[in-house]
Image: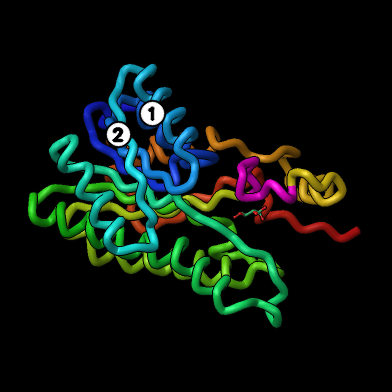
Amino acid sequence: MRGIKGKVAIVTGASSGIGQGIATRLGCEGAKVIVDYIGHPEGAEETERAIKDAGSDGEIVKADVTRMHDVQKLIGAAWERFGSADILVNNAGMERKSDFWDTPEGDYDQVMAVNLRGPFFLTQAFVRRLREADKPGRIVNISSVHEDMAFPGFATYCCAKGGLRMLMHDLAVELGPLGITVNNIAPGAIATPINRALLEDKPKLNALLANIPLGRLGTPKDVAGMVAFLCSDDASYITGSTFVIDGGLMRNYHEQ
Ligand code: BGC
């Protein structure tokens, strides 16, 4: 895709699932990629190898998006290693299941910290650098259909993703004058480690599949293609939007 070759991208949570797919795809498009991970160095190495095999360059950085020091380190790494950055993909995410009335304070704090606080301060650190360098940029948040749609048992996740949606709306306006675009991608049910429990529960999986008009789970590649598009020249006038990638899940309603 035009406009990605030679750019520098930072992808959080890039050692598995959707983040790994995104980092690999951007590498295949010729971007140099900062591969963030926290728990799985082998996964991060796999991602870096895929980027290098595609003929581009990558750098692995271990950074916890919930810690300010790590946030600064991660954004700084792009400037130290590659001299600048153009693209930030806020992908790292997690969810915890519990009935609303039983949700522990610790789960609330952690889910909000990873899914909302992380993107907030990563974006802030990224934008400060861009402003100093007087450079435009692209920000893509990997949100969820649950930035909009209820998910019983996951109120914390819904709060965080709903907040991420509103953050994107606000930043599209605040950062537009700086030439920085901000968009969300809202994946539906994608086969990744985040929903391992569901994937291993056949009856639940079949019930979910029955709700997806396209009849299958999504793959990280389905999401990565949209990220590449949003980082390309063709998307230069797109900001403030959410792009749903869910096989039709959100639009589906049946009466039995
Ligand atoms: C969640 C998955 C869920 C999917 C569809 C995603 O955001 O992470 O656990 O299956 O939405 O509901």
Where is 249 relative to 119, above or below?
above
Left or right: residue 231 compared with residue 254: left
Using the image, tell me which numbered label, if any, was put on residue 48: 1
Spot occupied by residue 2 in the image (x, y as percentages of width and height):
29, 27
Q: Do residues under tags 2 and 1 come within 8 Å of each other at their CB atoms?
A: yes
The amino acid on which the numbered mark 1 sits, given as a three-letter code, is: Glu
Q: Visible in this render: residue 173?
A: yes
Q: Residue at x 70, y 82 (%)?
A: 101
Please, which residue is most extreme toward the bottom here? 101
Relative to 65, say whether 33 is above or below: above
Quadrant containing the N terminus in the rendered view: top left
Mark 2: amino acid: Glu
Does dot 2 land on a helix, a strand or a loop? strand
Image coords of residue 232 (percent x, y): 31, 35
Give the residue at x 35% y 51%: 63
Separation of marks 2 and 1 at Cα, in angstroms: 7 Å
Magenta highlight range: 189-198
Asked whether 154 or 210 is in front, the reply is 154
Q: Tell me if residue 21 can be seen.
A: no
Decide if residue 187 is on the left or right side of residue 200: left
Mark 2 crowd level (few <14, some 14–19, many ≥20, 10 Å Cα): many
In the drawing, what numbered circle is on residue 211? none
Q: Earlier in the sequence, mark 2 or mark 1?
A: 1
- Taking the image in four quarters, ligand 1 sits in the one at bottom right
| Residue topped by disc 2 | 59
> In x, y percent, where is residue 59?
30, 34
Does the stretch in magenta take in 230? no
Dot 1 falls on a residue whose secondary structure is helix
